[in-house]
Image (spheres, helix red, strand yellow):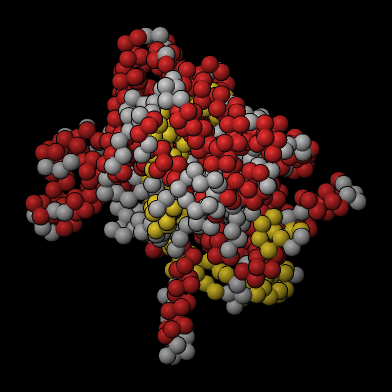
């Protein structure tokens, strides 16, 4: 262990060498950058040791390809993992520096939209914690997910310039840059009886990697997240290649190249279909595969065993061009025959599906695809030909079936079909989701390749979502059952023995109240709104989307408000409803949902007639760091998607791990949460997935019937358009009409009454403090099943076939 004095010396030396001035003159940003550099030195030694160990061993490594990695802040997390947090805090205090104040200066690495991106970050954390050789590959966006401001109740988007002050964690590896080629044409040539495919007249783009260390939890493993940045190759950006004086075109060219890694698309579960997005996809996939192949070839002469040493996982279909790109390299550059190349490629690639929403399934117009990626298109075409021939043998004459499964059909390239055909494993992210894939969305593929399908229920890392975000609860757990739960989350189950222990209950309650007080202070400070820390904190934070049904939550709040106005003595425990989440900038209904929440909040929060029994807060700019403040303070977790639509959800797991009680539908991982905690420790309502799917298939639902039958429901719906809310008469007409004139696609009205009932049950349960705390303990105790460590060990065992590689301790530290 290093000492406080030693840490201080490291810090002061680093400060001087970096800033060349006295510590007394340090700005907070100087202090932050210095500490980052000190921590990086600790990490570097382990990083080198890990890379050496991986280079020496002859076992398999995994590469997790993802268009998104939503890491959040890294400083505190890295200090915890390196076991340096206490020493560092003490050393800095003696230098007059508050660790938490400088940590707050770190921008969130917000290179993701939501569930899929955060899952990738949790998976990297678990790979390193489990000492598994697994790395990430993605794009180093200059601008991450936009910053959300609320102006007059509406969402306004601002650019997220997260690299403004540099990034202390990344290392630019200019010597490892590779070239990625777009456009041009393919010329066929024949040499020695072989057909050569010569890609010419292409636009070259230089892909430059930036490596970020992914630190293991108190082991010596440091894996790598490699993010690619698009630049012009110097030789191609030689101004003389443009006509002399054609300065403007030269600048335009540079701008166009760099635009590839400029910004993260803020799409979530909805494809906008911009060609730049397809460029992004091929850009990082090609760069990633080239660098993996290059590394492989340092140790092996031939690529015939590539799939035995390399697993590439594609996070949804966004990186699916990994399949034709690997084929291209094997065939065109390594001169392999098609069949061998295909065996290696399919042996290498595995695929996770994260959504069944039809509008999220990626497809690209063939003409756009072919123009941008002519050689890749030829390979996709050949894969499709061969696949359709097999289908023809299996289903002779069944053109409808073949068309529904083809990779190229109706003028589009269907990315999920390519993923299914070109991979060795297809997994869903919760039991019900995998079942729906097998029985509905991909049932034809399931018939052809039953062996490829498997489930891997999502998970979250307990290091960030408990240890880092809820230090008091973490300490209590370690004091009660020992610290092993951090290595083996199933150990959390030992807490079940303390469910009836009143001293333990008191401490759990005390910690929840403490965390609620912190959030209360944050809200007061930021919004000048006072909330009651003894009220029930009922929270829905996630992307704003019709299928997630934030509006169902709002309609219930309006109903509760109406009931309070009708009967000021109504027996309810005071409630604080908290929302957070971003709407895609082009998603009108989602943006109107935000306006609705803020409008209802403004009405309710200023109404003194209800004696503060109800408050509604919309927290601006929900991101990883805000989540870390929110989950520990929640009493109730809102997981109310239309059954069948939420593939898994992972926010549900974060709330559970921090002791919140779920109110939810039988959707995604909620079902498995219920299985773990038992039905007494969760509040379930609403249609089941089978019922929803049956309505979609057979009809039989009429929203108007409910409107006419349920007076309370009619009242809140009418309030959307009758002047009850202080907005123009048509502000929320779109929402109203969606329910009544478009027959309530997401069954909000259908589930309304059972949702109200479920909330009444929550209210009753909360009256019994002891019972409530017991439920809370059950949730924490059973959350181990949702550790991403468990999920990742299953991926490692069932899909990737990779094994832990212990990294020797570096004697220097
Ligand atoms: C092409 C536009 C687009 C962008 C993002 C389509 C689809 C996506 C993601 C796959 C959407 C997403 O994040 N899905 C979420 O994935 C989580 C991790 O598996 C699940 O927990 C969520 O239920 C699922 O909605």
- The quadrant in which the C terminus is found is top left
Residue plotted at (70% across, 50% down): 417
Residue plotted at (55% across, 53% down): 730
Q: Please, which residue is most extreme toward the bottom here?
A: 244
- Against 415, residue 568 (above or below) is above
User: Looking at the picture, how far across and down is residue 253, in whole percent?
Assistant: 47, 77
- Against 171, residue 450 (above or below) is above
Using residue 452 as the reference point, say whether residue 16 is left or right of it. left
Which quarter of the figure has residue 777?
top left
499 or 303, which is in the foreground? 499
Q: Please, which residue is most extreme toward the right here?
A: 397
500 or 439, which is in the foreground? 500
Using residue 216 as the reference point, say whether residue 279 is left or right of it. right
Using residue 769 as the reference point, say whether residue 353 is left or right of it. right
User: Looking at the picture, how far across and down is residue 670, in whole percent?
Assistant: 56, 29
- The quadrant in which the N terminus is found is top left
- Against 764, residue 523 (above or below) is below
Q: How many marks?
A: 0
Residue plotted at (23% across, 40% down): 100
302 or 455, which is in the foreground? 455
User: Looking at the picture, how far across and down is residue 130, in whole percent?
Assistant: 44, 33
Which quarter of the figure has residue 495?
top left
Observer able to see residue 454: no
User: Looking at the picture, how far across and down is residue 739, in whole percent?
Assistant: 63, 43
Residue plotted at (44% across, 53% down): 155
Observer able to see residue 500: yes
769 or 192, which is in the foreground? 769
- Against 360, residue 609 (above or below) is above
């Amino acid at each position: 262990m290093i000492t406080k004095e030693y840490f201080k010396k490291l810090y002061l030396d680093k400060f001087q060498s970096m800033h060349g001035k006295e510590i007394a003159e340090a700005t907070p940003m100087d202090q932050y950058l210095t500490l980052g550099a000190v921590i990086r030195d600790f990490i570097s030694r382990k990083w080198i040791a890990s890379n050496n160990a991986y280079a020496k061993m002859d076992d398999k490594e995994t590469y997790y390809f993802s268009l998104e990695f939503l890491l959040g802040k890294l400083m505190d997390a890295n200090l915890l993992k390196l076991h340096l947090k206490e020493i560092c805090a003490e050393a800095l205090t003696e230098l007059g520096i508050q660790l938490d104040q400088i940590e707050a200066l770190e921008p969130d690495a917000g290179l993701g939209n939501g569930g899929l991106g955060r899952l990738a970050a949790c998976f990297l954390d678990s790979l390193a914690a489990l000492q598994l050789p697994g790395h990430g590959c993605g794009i180093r966006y200059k601008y991450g997910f936009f910053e959300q401001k609320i102006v007059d109740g509406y969402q306004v988007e601002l650019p997220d310039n997260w690299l403004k002050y540099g990034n202390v964690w990344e290392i630019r590896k200019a010597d490892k840059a590779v070239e990625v080629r777009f456009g041009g044409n393919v010329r066929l040539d024949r040499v020695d009886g072989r057909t050569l495919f010569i890609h010419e007249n292409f636009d070259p783009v230089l892909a430059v990697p930036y490596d970020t260390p992914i630190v293991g939890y108190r082991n010596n493993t440091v894996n790598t997240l490699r993010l690619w940045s698009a630049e012009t190759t110097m030789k191609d950006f030689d101004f003389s290649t443009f006509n002399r004086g054609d300065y403007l075109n030269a600048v335009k060219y540079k701008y166009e190249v760099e635009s590839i890694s400029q910004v993260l698309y803020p799409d979530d579960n909805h494809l906008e279909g911009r060609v730049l997005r397809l460029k992004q996809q091929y850009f990082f996939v090609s760069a990633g595969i080239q660098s993996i192949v290059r590394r492989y070839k340092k140790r092996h002469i031939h690529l015939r065993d590539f799939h035995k040493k390399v697993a590439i996982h594609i996070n949804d279909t966004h990186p699916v061009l990994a399949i034709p790109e690997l084929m291209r390299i094997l065939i065109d550059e390594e001169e392999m025959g098609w069949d061998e190349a295909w065996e290696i490629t399919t042996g290498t690639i595995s695929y996770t599906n994260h959504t069944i929403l039809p509008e999220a399934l990626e497809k690209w117009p063939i003409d756009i695809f072919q123009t941008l990626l002519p050689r890749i298109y030829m390979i996709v075409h050949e894969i499709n030909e061969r696949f359709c021939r097999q289908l023809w043998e299996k289903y002779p004459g069944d053109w409808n079936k073949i068309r529904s499964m083809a990779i190229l059909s109706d003028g589009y390239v269907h990315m999920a079909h390519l993923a299914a055909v070109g991979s060795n494993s297809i997994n869903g992210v919760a039991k019900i989701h995998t079942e729906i894939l097998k029985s509905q969305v991909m049932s034809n593929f399931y018939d052809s390749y039953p062996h490829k399908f498997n489930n891997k229920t999502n998970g979250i890392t307990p290091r960030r979502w408990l240890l880092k975000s809820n230090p008091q609860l973490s300490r209590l757990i370690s004091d009660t059952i020992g610290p092993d739960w951090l290595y083996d989350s199933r150990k959390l189950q030992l807490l079940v023995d303390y469910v009836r222990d009143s001293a333990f209950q008191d401490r759990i309650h005390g910690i929840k109240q403490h965390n609620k007080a912190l959030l209360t202070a944050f809200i007061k400070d930021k919004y000048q709104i006072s909330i009651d820390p003894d009220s029930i904190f009922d929270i829905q934070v996630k992307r704003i989307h019709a299928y997630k049904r934030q509006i169902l939550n709002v309609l219930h709040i309006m109903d509760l408000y109406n009931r309070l106005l009708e009967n000021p003595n109504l027996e309810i425990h005071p409630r604080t409803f908290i929302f957070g989440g971003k709407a895609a900038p082009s998603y009108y209904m989602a943006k109107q949902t935000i306006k609705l929440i803020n409008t209802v909040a403004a009405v309710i929060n200023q109404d003194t007639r209800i004696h503060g029994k109800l408050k509604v807060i919309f927290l601006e700019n929900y991101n990883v760091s805000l989540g870390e403040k929110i989950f520990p303070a929640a009493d109730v977790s809102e997981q109310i998607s239309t059954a069948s639509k939420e593939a898994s959800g992972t926010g549900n797991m974060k709330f559970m791990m921090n002791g919140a009680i779920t109110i939810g539908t039988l959707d995604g991982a909620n079902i498995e949460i219920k299985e773990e905690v038992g039905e007494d420790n969760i509040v379930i309502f609403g249609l089941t997935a089978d019922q929803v799917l049956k309505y979609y298939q057979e009809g039989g639902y009429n929203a108007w019937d409910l409107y006419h039958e349920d007076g309370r429901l009619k009242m809140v719906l009418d309030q959307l358009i009758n002047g009850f809310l202080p907005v123009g008469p048509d502000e929320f007409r779109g929402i109203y009409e969606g329910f009544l004139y478009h027959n309530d696609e997401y069954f909000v009205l259908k589930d309304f009454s059972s949702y109200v009932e479920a909330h009444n049950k929550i209210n009753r349960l909360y009256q019994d403090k002891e019972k409530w705390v017991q439920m809370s303990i059950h949730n924490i105790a059973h959350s181990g099943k949702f550790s991403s460590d468990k999920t990742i060990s299953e991926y490692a065992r069932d899909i990737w076939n990779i094994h832990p590689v212990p990294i020797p301790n570096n004697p220097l530290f």
